[in-house]
Image: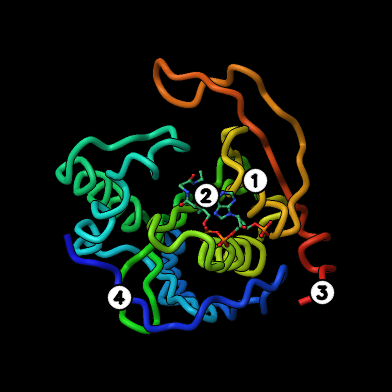
């Protein structure tokens, strides 16, 4: 399995990094508005719409046991990951998009080392989520992905609320929510997270007012 090439110094672990600038393309037609995420630059990453070839990079971490320990949807094979990417690409092509699955590539090497999603599940209310290759945990990349997702949701998609859910034992994801300025709304015990799979889940959110009022 190829190793991740990281030609970067250890990440600056500032609690609130610079807000990323968001470049997206919106094509309007009578049928709706097609939104493409062309590339959002954070200190170490480019975050952009998925492409089919990202499936190979995702399979390098999404199939790992330590990665799967804290997520609900667990792919078994590289073919499952490929099908997931194919589903994302179909959603990308939708005229009125409510689901955004994005890839995070290292600026230094163009390798895809993470992913994020934004899902509008109620009007102006977006769920976000994230994943990073386990070999790169703790270097601030999760925070960079989270900041980019919030910037897209609040600054471009008009969100009034952004929220995230994490298994209660997922310390990294909960700390990431705190870093992003989210607050805990509730803990739901024995929460259904996937067919036949229940666990305790922590819900966190941030309002547009708190996002725009925060220092950056
Ligand atoms: C959650 C995840 C994306 C965090 O990525 P990351 O790149 O390590 O995040 P960051 O480096 O920005 O760190 C964010 C916080 O998590 C903490 N953290 C990172 N790895 C940790 C670990 N293994 N255990 C406990 N805390 C950890 C960091 O110290 C930081 O907290 P701090 O502000 O108190 O210092 C990563 O652990 C992951 O991919 N997990 C598997 C997928 C997943 O669980 N996704 C969430 C469900 S949607």
Would you say the beta carbon of the disc 2 residue lies within 8 angstroms of ligand 1? yes
Which residue is nearer to you in this view: 17 or 64?
64
Task: Check disc 3 and report the residue beneath it.
Answer: 215
The answer to whether residue 212 is above or below residue 195 is: below
Q: Which residue is mark 4?
A: 5
Q: Which residue is mark 2?
A: 129
Horizontally, residue 24 falls left or right of residue 88, namely right
Q: Are discs 3 and 4 less than 8 Å apart at CB?
A: no
| Labels 2, 4: front one | 4
* Mark 1, secondary structure of its residue: helix
Q: Earlier in the sequence, mark 1 or mark 3?
A: 1
Estimate the spatial distance between the alpha carbons at disc 2 and disc 4, rounded to whole Å.
Answer: 24 Å
Q: Residues within 10 Å of mark 2 (few under 14, many from 20)?
A: many
Question: In the picture provided, is 63 more to the left or to the right than 171?
Answer: left
Q: Residue at x 29, y 69 (%)?
A: 4
Q: Nearer the viewer, residue 152 or 122?
A: 152
Q: Quadrant of residue 20?
A: bottom right
Where does residue 209 sit, x and y in percent of width and height? 83, 60
Quadrant location of the C terminus in the rendered image: bottom right
Q: Which mark is residue 174?
A: 1
């Amino acid at each position: 399995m190829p190793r991740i090439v990281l030609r970067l110094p250890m990440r600056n672990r500032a609690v609130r990094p610079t807000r990323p600038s968001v470049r997206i393309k919106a094509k309007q037609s009578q049928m709706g508005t097609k939104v493409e995420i062309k590339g959002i630059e954070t200190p170490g990453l480019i975050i952009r719409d998925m492409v089919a070839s990202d499936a190979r990079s995702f399979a390098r971490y999404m199939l790992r046991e330590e990665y799967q320990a804290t997520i609900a949807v667990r792919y078994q094979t590289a073919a499952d990951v490929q099908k997931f990417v194919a589903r994302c690409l179909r959603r990308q092509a939708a005229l009125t998009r409510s689901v955004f699955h994005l890839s995070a590539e290292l600026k230094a090497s163009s390798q895809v080392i993470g992913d994020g999603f934004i899902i509008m599940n109620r009007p102006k209310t977006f769920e976000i989520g994230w994943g990073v290759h386990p070999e790169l945990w703790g270097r601030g990349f999760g925070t960079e992905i989270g900041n980019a997702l919030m910037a897209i949701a609040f600054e471009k998609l008009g969100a009034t609320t952004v929220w995230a859910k994490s298994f209660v034992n997922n310390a990294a994801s909960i700390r990431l929510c705190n870093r992003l300025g989210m607050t805990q709304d509730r803990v739901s015990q024995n929460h259904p997270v996937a067919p036949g799979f229940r666990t305790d889940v922590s819900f966190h959110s941030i309002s547009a007012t708190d996002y725009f009022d925060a220092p950056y």
